[in-house]
Amino acid sequence: MQQPAVPELAHTHTRPIHWLATATAVAGVVALSSVLQPNAATAAQTAGPETKHAPASVTPPDPAHVDFPLECGPVKAIVVKKATGDLDADGSPETVAVVHCDSPMGTPPDGVYVLTHARATATPRLVATLVDPKDNLTVSDIAVRDGAVDAELLGYSSDDVPRCCPDTKNSAKWQWKNGSFVRSTPAGAHSV
């Protein structure tokens, strides 16, 4: 048997004190790392003179936090559809909400409302009514595309048509122009 060139070292055998020292060192590193954190990462670049500052709010307004101008009596107003997008090119998204009274029977008329964030508080606020419930229309589809609101509206050709069964269909488009929403009929749209 060959003898090792280096005599046996006493510290190569682990003892409870070694484990205690290692555990204390690891706990110290974990505690120190929780105190010394790097700054939060952001995707923003350093602002130069030509840089536009984005608004603080980038989350679309939540229609659940808005009182809509509907008179629903004993039932509540419910949001049945919504779409989001930047409608006024300010870099902050708006929400378009389709709302009606939660009626147990029939087809209640819809209201279409545009919501944005209040600048000072970032709380959602109603800024425009695109379809008034008094118009007796139902929205079958709504979307925000290229900064415009597109909707399919169902209605009634006369008061003799039952409220359960709309018999007209129209397409509508709203765009923000000169401080207000302007309605137009998209190309290729037709009435039924």
Image: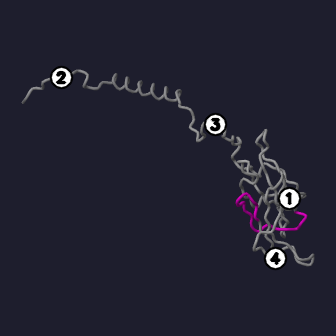
Quarter occupied by the C terminus: bottom right
The secondary element bearing badge 3 is classed as loop
Q: Of tags 3 and 4, which is closer to the observer?
A: 3
> Do residues under tags 1 and 3 come within 8 Å of each other at their CB atoms?
no
Q: Of tags 1 and 3, which is closer to the observer?
A: 3
Depicted 22 relative to depicted 179: above or below: above
Q: Of tags 2 and 3, which is closer to the observer?
A: 3
Q: Which residue is mark 3?
A: 48
Residue visible at 85% across and 57% down in the picture: 129
The secondary element bearing badge 2 is classed as loop
Q: CA distance from mark 4 to mark 1?
A: 32 Å
In the shown orientation, is residue 165 left or right of residue 21? right
Circle 1 Cα neighbour tier, 10 Å, few/some/many (<14 / 14–19 / ≥20): few
Q: CA distance from mark 4 to mark 2?
A: 97 Å
Depicted 148 relative to depicted 24: above or below: below
Circle 2 Cα neighbour tier, 10 Å, few/some/many (<14 / 14–19 / ≥20): few
Q: Earlier in the sequence, mark 2 or mark 3?
A: 2
Please tell me whether residue 71 belongs to the stretch shown in magenta: no
Depicted 128 relative to depicted 35: above or below: below
The secondary element bearing badge 1 is classed as loop
Q: CA distance from mark 1 to mark 3?
A: 53 Å
Circle 3 Cα neighbour tier, 10 Å, few/some/many (<14 / 14–19 / ≥20): few
User: Which amino acid, mark 1?
Assistant: Val
Q: Earlier in the sequence, mark 1 or mark 2?
A: 2
User: Which amino acid, mark 3?
Assistant: Gly
Residue visible at 81% across and 76% down in the picture: 191
The numbered mark at residue 75 is: 1
